[in-house]
Amino acid sequence: MQHTSLVVRTSGEAREPGGPGSQRFVFAQRVHLRGRVASHLALWMLALFIAAPIASAAEREAQPRAISPRGELDRDEKVTIDLFERSRDSVVFISTREQVRDFWSRNVFSVPRGTGSGFIWDEAGHVVTNFHVIQGASEATVRLANGSDYKASLVGASRIHDIAVLKIGAGQKRPPPLPLGSSHDLKVGQRVYAIGNPFGLDWTLTSGIISALNRSLKDENGTTIEHLIQTDAAINPGNSGGPLLDSAGRLIGINTAIYSPSGTSAGIGFAVPADTVNRVVPQLVRHGKYISPSLGIELDEDINQRLTAALRVRGVVVLRVPPDSPAASVGLKGVAVTGRNVVVPGDIIVSVEGTVVDSVGKLAARLDDFRVGDKVRVTVRRDETTRDIVLTLLPGT
């Protein structure tokens, strides 16, 4: 049986498979397919030709860059690095715990309380920090720069100076104490360095300048700390108790507080001056407490504010002078009350060694610059007469 099939031509005509038009169509198809293969091959070769340099460029770009020579560190950098490396081992990390009682079981647990900084004071293993770092704690642990932890015992503390002394038994591994400087000769603009553990980031160094001197600051308990150094070196929570150093690496203060609405550094930090530290710490080591120098007279801040406002004077009103006291022997006189309950003022203290005092707190701070047994010149006013007297400072209560 003969089969007939049609081959489609480009012109739309139909031919038998065996005819000449059919052969021409098949040839045309083969040429067309070969052309398509050739074009694809050409495109593929072109893609390889283009991609090869791109890949090579990408490989070149992925290679590590050559390091540019840095050259010598400048002098200031070398000084700062040397200061940190010399001081680091004498700075410590302090962590505290407190005991709490479970409400239901009545069991007592020891829980973390806080962290702070401190520094080695002497070869005997005394560590100085802030009072508020260890306040309310039941135990404290001191970590040295080499990672060793030691249980610390409390030797003594002074709330009014925000200073506390701990002691560790590090044996022969004890790091050296920081060299001690002075604070009475500091100048605004001097460069300073703070080392501590802000937010638990141990052994952090920050730097700045002395922004102001002789600042006063009330703590959260209402106690006024006097003679503070103000600095713009970054001080954050955890820096408390750490050292403030001068450019020679000497201790010139203890970082104690910041002024900040957010609780982090705002460029206003405060440090207890070295002269105060060097006067308070030996007493804490020797007696376990600080013995304030006193004039041996009775004073009261609230009453003083009312009386000076009523009398329209500035100074500290002497309320009572104990009989047979040094103050009584030089004729110092307190207030008197008449039969009609009228208060008659006696002597009003206006200055100590030339420094004006207009509150009980400032008088105490000025006397704190001296030691028990020192003689000081006190200027007092009675009625309209001003005179100087010399008093020997007594141990305060």
Image (cartoon, helix red, strand yellow):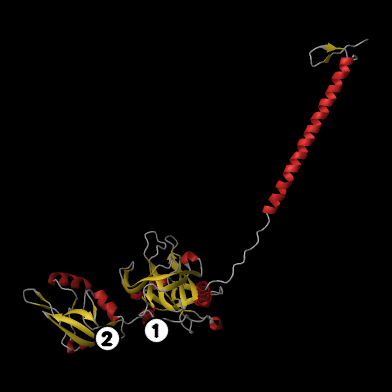
Left/right placement of residue 48 relative to residue 151 reads right
Horizontal and vertical percent position of residue 392? 25, 88
The answer to whether residue 204 is above or below residue 368 is above
Q: Is residue 397 visible?
A: no
Residue 394 - label: 2
Q: Is residue 5 visible?
A: yes
Give the SS element for disc 1: helix
Residue 25 in which image quadrant = top right
Residue occupying image coordinates x 55% and y 83%: 172
Q: Which tag, 1 or 2, sits closer to the chain's start?
A: 1
Of the 4 image quadrants, the one containing the N terminus is: top right
Residue occupying image coordinates x 78% and y 36%: 42
Q: How many marks?
A: 2
Q: Residue furthest right?
A: 1
Q: Label 1 sits on what residue type?
A: Pro
Q: Residue furthest left?
A: 340
Horizontal and vertical percent position of residue 44? 77, 38
Residue occupying image coordinates x 86% and y 22%: 27
Left/right placement of residue 61 relative to residue 165 reads right
Residue occupying image coordinates x 73% and y 42%: 50
Q: Label 2 sits on what residue type?
A: Leu
Q: Residue furthest top?
A: 1
Label 2: how many Cα within 10 Å (few below 14, some 14–19, many 20+) = many
Horizontal and vertical percent position of residue 82? 53, 76
Label 1: how many Cα within 10 Å (few below 14, some 14–19, many 20+) = some
Horizontal and vertical percent position of residue 264? 42, 62
